[in-house]
Amino acid sequence: MVVATRQRRTNTSVSQEDYLKTIWEMEQEEQEPISARLSEVLRVTPPAVTAALKRMARNGTVRLGRRGQMRLTSKGREIAGHLALRHRLAEKLLSEVLGMPWTRVHDEAEKLEHAISPEVEGLLLKYFGRESSCPHGNPLFSGVSGQRRRDRARRLSEMRAGQRLEIQKVYEKESDFLEYLDRNRLRPGTRLLVEHIDYDQTMQLLVAGKTVHLGRSASDRIWVKPLRR
């Protein structure tokens, strides 16, 4: 496995790794990967996306359809999954060892994930444990090598008034959003009660004795599991 990983990283540029992980993340979030969304997320021009996808198709990491559909091949999915794993390990290193706030580790991990070698990856896995999660609640191997999340978490926006819940994971790509959650103690592991849901889907939550209001755009980016009464 280590040798194969080294070969993949030699043949795949940092830019292509970013494309592969972005497509992989869209698939994990059940979004349809399209060129326009890639252009927006990666902040590159549409022609650059088109050229990159053609190179990746020739390299056997992406399969392109006639109508613009794109799917990762098994080779592409394996590369992207390992990059996601290294990203989560980097987040844990920054947060749990270096003491960086969990609200800020995502952007730094985006830079470090490409520099983690297979040897360091193995050492970090041994240090943190294979069953642990990143600071945002993602199990290290969630979605990697075809593994699906085992916790059956659902979006907070899907819950009903009166339910007691525990936060499993949160959307990690916007630091302002994470800082808002942190100020209101809405972190992975936090338990809460859905007190009321307004007509516009704004939720009134009871969190550690404090009432918090969340709009639909925020509750869509928090995954929870119901607690037994």
Image (cartoon, grey):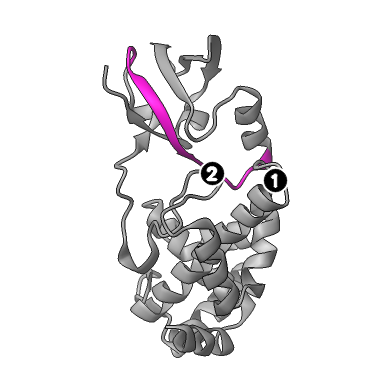
Q: Position of residue 64 (x, y in %)?
A: 38, 77
Element under disc 1: loop
Do we see residue 200 in this rendering? yes
Residue 175 in the image: above or below residue 225: below
Task: Identify the image quadrant of the C terminus.
Answer: top left
| Crowd around label 1: few <14 · some 14–19 · many ≥20 (10 Å) | some
Q: Which tag, 2 or 1, sits closer to the chain's start?
A: 1
Let me know if residue 165 is in the magenta part: yes
- The image quadrant that residue 167 belongs to is top left
Q: Residues within 10 Å of mark 2 (few under 14, many from 20)?
A: many
Q: Is 223 situated above or below 58?
A: above
The type of residue carrying mark 2 is His
User: Which segment did they paint magenta?
Assistant: 161-175
73 vs 89, nearest the viewer = 89
Q: Residue at x 42, y 83 (%)?
A: 1
Identify the residue under disc 2.
Answer: 136
The secondary structure type at the circle numbered 2 is: loop
The amino acid type of the residue labelled 1 equals Arg
Query: In the depicted view, which residue is nearer to us: 69 or 110?
Result: 110
Residue 104 has which mark?
Answer: 1
Q: CA distance from mark 2 to mark 1?
A: 11 Å
Q: Residue at x 66, y 41 (%)?
A: 103
Label for residue 29? none
Residue 207 locus on image (x, y percent)? 51, 16
Q: Position of residue 121 (x, y in %)?
A: 55, 71
Along the horizontal axis of the image, is 50 left or right of 14?
Answer: left
Q: Residue at x 70, y 45 (%)?
A: 104
Evaluate whether residue 201 shows in this view.
no
Badges 2 and 1: C-beta atoms under 8 Å apart?
no
